[in-house]
Image: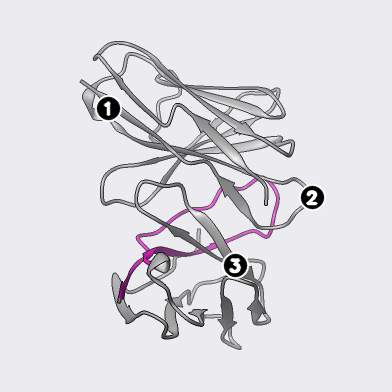
Amino acid sequence: DAKTTQPNSMESNEEEPVHLPCNHSTISGTDYIHWYRQLPSQGPEYVIHGLTSNVNNRMASLAIAEDRKSSTLILHRATLRDAAVYYCILGSGGGADGLTFGKGTHLIIQP
Amino acid sequence: GAVVSQHPSWVICKSGTSVKIECRSLDFQATTMFWYRQFPKQSLMLMATSNEGSKATYEQGVEKDKFLINHASLTLSTLTVTSAHPEDSSFYICSARIPTFSGELFFGEGSRLTVL
């Protein structure tokens, strides 16, 4: 599996935007970029995914670099409930493959 | 959204006993489910892929005789930890993908196993 690199931790203030970076320089042409987050003692939760174009949903936005070697998850207005470990994962868009999780970024939100 | 549910959410057992964890897709049929394990302060590790009506596919280093997976129906997969030992204590999480939807994996709440 192609590998992703994320900062171990990031800190932000409540009600401010948060930009979580992810590097994936060995991404293949068919790899989707997936983002999940995990709150303590819970299973991961889907956040967003994309292939080439930027994506928006009710939770976040995903900005994908033109060469696809990096991406940024954007939380437009962080709340305390957004404090979690965020995982950037490369994988197929569907099918029968599980996802391989890296260490992720521990996002801390200050009130 | 789609829901995946696990039971039990936590279990404590004695060393040498077997423990079964259930994973159900509540509002969709899942031909494939995935089992993960997570140790404290570590990331999730994919253990195996559970296929409805056929044998599970195990990741390298995961003992198939110790972690028995059964996917008897389109909505239920079970993971049995046989002859559990303290080193098997972990957070076990299942997930499933709606077959016609691309990308999104739905995860269960997780089952915390403590082996005394």
Q: Is residue A92 above or below residue B14?
A: below
Farthest residue to the right: give it: B100
**What SS does tag 2 mark?**
loop
Give the residue type that dot 1 points to: Thr
Split into 4 quadrants, where in the image is the C terminus of chain B?
top left
| Residue annotated with mark 1 | B114
Q: Is residue A95 magenta?
A: yes
The x and y percentages for residue B64 are: 45, 23
The x and y percentages for residue A22 are: 44, 76
Label 3: few (<14), some (14–19) or many (≥20) C-alpha neighbours in 10 Å = many
Q: Give the tally of numbered discs.
A: 3
Relative to residue A25, is residue B12 drawn left or right? left
Where residue B72 sits, quadrant-wise, is: top right
Q: Is residue B109 above or below residue B21?
A: below
Residue numbers of the magenta segment: A83-110
| Residue annotated with mark 3 | A48
Circles 3 and 1 on the same chain: no
Chain bearing mark 1: B
| Residue annotated with mark 2 | B100
Q: Nearer the viewer, residue B106 or A81?
A: A81
Q: CA distance from mark 2 to mark 3?
A: 17 Å
